[in-house]
Structures are given as structure tokens and as C-alpha cells.
Amino acid sequence: MSSEQNISLQEQQFMHKIKAEEKIEPKDWMPEKYRKNLIRQISQHAHSEVIGMQPEGNFLTRAPSLRRKAILLSKIQDEAGHGLYLYSAAETLGITREEMIEALQSGQAKYASIFNYPALTWGDMGAIGWLVDGAAIVNQVSLQRTSYGPYSRGMIRICKEESFHQRQGYDIMLSLVNGTPAQKAMAQDSLNRFYWPALMMFGPHDSESAHSAKSMEWKIKRETNDDLRQKFIDQTASQIEFLGLEHPDKELKWNEERGHYDSGEIDWEEFHNVIAGNGHCNRQRLEHHIKAHEEGAWVREALAAYNAKKQANKAEAA
Amino acid sequence: MSDTIKDATLEYAIRLGDDANVLGHRISEWVSHGPFLEEDIAYANVALDYIGRARMFYGYASELANDGRTEDDFAYMRDDRQYRNLLLMEMPKEDFAYSQVRQLFIDIYYGLLLPELVKSKDDTLAAIAAKAIKETRYHLRRSRDWVLRLGDGTEESHRRTQRAVDSLWGYTHEMFEMDDTERLLVDSGIGVDITKLRDDWHRQVGSILTEATLNVPEDSWTVRGGRIGYHTENLGHLLTEMQFVHRSYPGCQW
Ligand SMILES: [Fe+2]
Ligand SMILES: [Fe+2]
Ligand SMILES: [Fe+2]
């Protein structure tokens, strides 16, 4: 059998599995582009968890109550854990964490652009948990059915923790709207600044999305950007109403026929502008990551040297 | 409970609460700044334990004070002259070696103090100590491992770790000093006689430092004052940051 025929047979079996909703596992054959596509998506997801620790970490030391500080600490701790699971899931595809971090720091790999927006007030801790984690959950729930086994299992684990993240954010908003006028204004301001960027988290319209078609065929993605975004718009509308805040989308209107909200257009110029590096925090986020990594170099070296010494001692003793 | 004992217990709960609050805050500064992701998780975990402890001690303090002050009033509405934490807790985060050496000193300290506090005649303090013991066991495993690795790692890590030991040593003495308030509580079976922990602490710290190829410093300098609110300049900055939002919106619920 020629190698070409061989590959096409493997590819057939692969597509057969995908169609049958069977998971692809690390040892299974997979098309090179499927592997590359997954590495891109999973590592980007991992980097987002890690970079996402920064805007919230930025408020840990200013949390207005000990209870909130404890909750925020445990949320950020979860996010770091999500980064770890996802790096391990990506490692099953034949890339190391060091290589992924290198790609992040060189700008070759991306992270969610939402984290390029600054966290300015305590209200932003509410808006981030509620809207940013909320949008992430909509996406991640859908990814529980993704075709790659380790990614799918990672998502199932992560989703269990994410609902707590969204609840704590919404709970912060509830305390603010039930508080003083200044607190309520803080909540409105945070909603205004984070609502549209949260919608942008779902990516460009389906018609514009570069990676979508193939990802859908391979069942890496299970629902389109626009469908996921619609879910989020629908669920958020009633939450905003319950908080008694003004909706940032003045064109939002219930469409009886569609059974969904119609909404105003996203400012795509802003979207592309922030991705292109013109967000308030693009530089800061990467520099923060690089600085921590560089300052930690001597620690990692010490750890390696210590372990090597212990290994050598053991070998000598044996 | 007599009024004198009650006042002394309140003061004691505030001291222990301040220790936990200030240290927990310092540790939380590491989150997203660690040398790798696993350490960010560990730091968040340890910070969370200390913030939890602060809440329990302050919660008990507010019960004893019974004057409407909440845990947050203790944390957010007092200035540095009113804070009663040990100076060691407020020292800045500096580098990884510095923070791990500080943590080792403190973990060994609590590893000795908490098993005594568990025997307190005060049920609340005993219960808080019982919960904290388990956490401290984990903390100590981590700080001990790190000091060993850093001390006996590379030349650079050794140098940084020795520097940390030398710069923190002078702040360890006040951990074992008592005033009349604490002596009264020791006599009543409520507080721990920390002067008796000193030798064990030195023995344990000495043996880990030696294993880590580090020198145990001479007792050539001592700074004290945390328990009477005579702090280093570090605490004011820490509180400025910690209390900013809370104080900017007076009387709010969060
Ligand atoms: Fe997450
Ligand atoms: Fe989250
Ligand atoms: Fe813990």
C-alpha cells in the first residue's frame, strides 16, 4: 500500500470517528492541520486563563472587604488551575509548556483580547466575573462536546468551577446596585465598559471568521460565533434588567418571531484596533508576564540544579 | 469571663488577626508574579488560608468587643499605629527567596504555637487553631522545601537566600516576647507562652538552614514594636492600598 493511500485511509477513519461523535485521543492518528488548529486554540485558551489573572490580581490588594478578597483569591486560584489543565491538554499534542509560553511572549500566540481592557474600579471585578466569565462559560459549555478528548474533559472540569466565577461577579454587582448611589453608578460604569468587549469575545461574525469552517467540520468548535453570542445576549438582557441597570445597547429589542433579542452592531473597528495592539493594556499584560517569568528564571534554575544534585547523590549511593 | 480577661482576649484576637491579615495581604501580592504557574496557585492558596484566619480572629474580636465593629472595621478602619501585627509580617515581598524565608520562619513559629493554642481554655481560639494547624502543616512543607532548594541550588539562589535570612533575622526576636496582656492570658490558660517556643524554633530553623547550606546569623541586631503599634514604614503603604476602596466609600456594604 502506498503511503498516500495509507494516509487517506487514516483520514477516513478519523472523519468516521468525528462523525460518530467519538473522541480523538492523543495516540490516535489525526491530520496535521487538526493538530495545529487544536494547539492554536487550546494554547490561546490557556494563555487567556493566565493573562486573565492580571486584571483581577490588580484588585486583590484593594478588595473592599475580607470576604470579597477571599472569594477573589479563590477565583484567581481557579484560573491559574485552568491554565495548568489547558497547558497539559495542549502538551498531549506534542508541544511543551515552555514553547507555548515562548510563543505567547513573542506575540506569536494570542490570548483573549478582553484582557487588554483595564480594570479600573471594584465594579470591574463584578463586571469581569459576570460578563467576561459569563461569556467564557457560554463558549466553554459548547466546547465540552469538542472532538479532542483531553480538551473536552478539561472543559467539563473547568465549567464546574466557572459557574462560581460568574455568580461571584453577579453577586458583586448585586451588592453595588443595592448600595449607595455612588456604588450603583460604579456598577453602571463597569457594565458600560465591559458589555461590548464581552460580546466581542465570541469573535468576528461567522461570515468573517478565518478559522471557523474547518473547526466546525472537525467538531473542534460545536457552535458558531454568532450563535454563541446570541445566547449570551439573550441571557444577559434579563440579568441587566434584574440589576435595574441601563442596558448599554440602545437598539436591543425582543424579536418574537426569532425568539431572540435583536441587537445593535458591535464596533468592529474597536475590536480590530484592540487586537492590533491599541488596547490600554496590551503591552502591560505581556510585559507583566515576561517580567514575572524573567524574575523567576533564577528560581527555576535553582530548582533544576537542586534536583540534579539530588539525582547525582542517589546515583552515587546506588 | 472577667472584664480584664475579656479585654486581654480581645487584644489577643486582634493581634493574631492582624498577623494573619497583614501576612495574607503580602502573600496575595505574589499572585500572577510567581516564577511559574504552580507557584501562583500555591501563593493564592496560602494567602487564602491567612485571609480566612484573619476573618476568624477578627470575627471573634467583634464578638468580644460587642460594640458593633465588624471584621472589616478591624481590617479597614484602623491606622498603622493601631495595628498590632509582628513586624515580620509587614516586611515587603521582595524576591522569591525573601518571601520563602519569611514564610519558613512563620510556618515553624505557627507549627509550634498552634498546637499549644488548641489546648486553650477559650473554645473559640482553640477551634480556630485546630483548623489552622492543618493549613500550617502544608505551608511548612512548601517553605521548607523551597528554602532547601534555594539554599542548595545555584550560587545565585544561595546568595539571595542567605541575604534574606540575614535581613529578616532581626525581626524574629519579637515573636517570642510577651507583655502583661499575654502573660495574664497564659496564667488563665487562654494564651500561649511563646517564650517557651523559642528554643524549639531555633533548633528547627537552625537544622533546616544548615541542611540548606546556609549560615544561621548571629543575634547582632533586633527590631521590635509590632505589638505596641510601632511599625516599620512598610505597613503604612500596605494599609494605604488595602484600605483605599473601603475608605473611599464610607459605610458601604460590598
Ligand atoms: Fe477559567
Ligand atoms: Fe473563570
Ligand atoms: Fe490551604
Image (cartoon, rainbow, N blue to C red):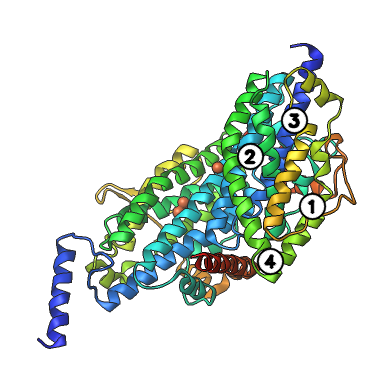
In the depicted view, which residue is nearer to us: B96 or A309?
Answer: A309
Q: What label does residue B51 carry, if any? A: 2
Residue drawn at point x = 67 percent, y = 43 percent: B107
Q: Is residue A250 visible?
A: no
Q: Which residue is mark 1?
A: B168
Q: Residue furthest bottom?
A: A2
Q: Earlier in the sequence, mark 2 or mark 1?
A: 2
Q: Secondary structure at mark 2?
A: helix
Q: Secondary structure at mark 4?
A: helix
Q: Residues within 10 Å of mark 1 (few under 14, many from 20)?
A: many
Q: Is residue A71 visible?
A: yes
Residue drawn at point x = 50 percent, y = 48 percent: A129
Alpha carbon distance from label 3 to label 1: 24 Å
Q: Residues within 10 Å of mark 3 (few under 14, many from 20)?
A: many
Q: Residue furthest left?
A: A1
Alpha carbon distance from label 4 to label 3: 36 Å
Q: Quadrant of ligand 1?
A: bottom left
Do marks 3 and 2 share a subunit?
A: yes
Q: Earlier in the sequence, mark 3 or mark 1?
A: 3
Q: Which residue is mark 4?
A: B157
Place residue A199 in its image quadrant: bottom left
* Tag 3 near tag 1, CB within 8 Å: no
Do marks 2 and 1 share a subunit?
A: yes
Q: Which residue is mark 3?
A: B14
Residue drawn at point x = 76 percent, y = 17 percent: B188
Q: Chain of mark 1?
A: B
Q: Quadrant of the N terminus of chain B?
A: top right
Question: Which residue type does callout 4 highlight?
Answer: Ser
Alpha carbon distance from label 3 to label 2: 14 Å
Alpha carbon distance from label 2 to label 4: 29 Å
Do marks 3 and 1 share a subunit?
A: yes
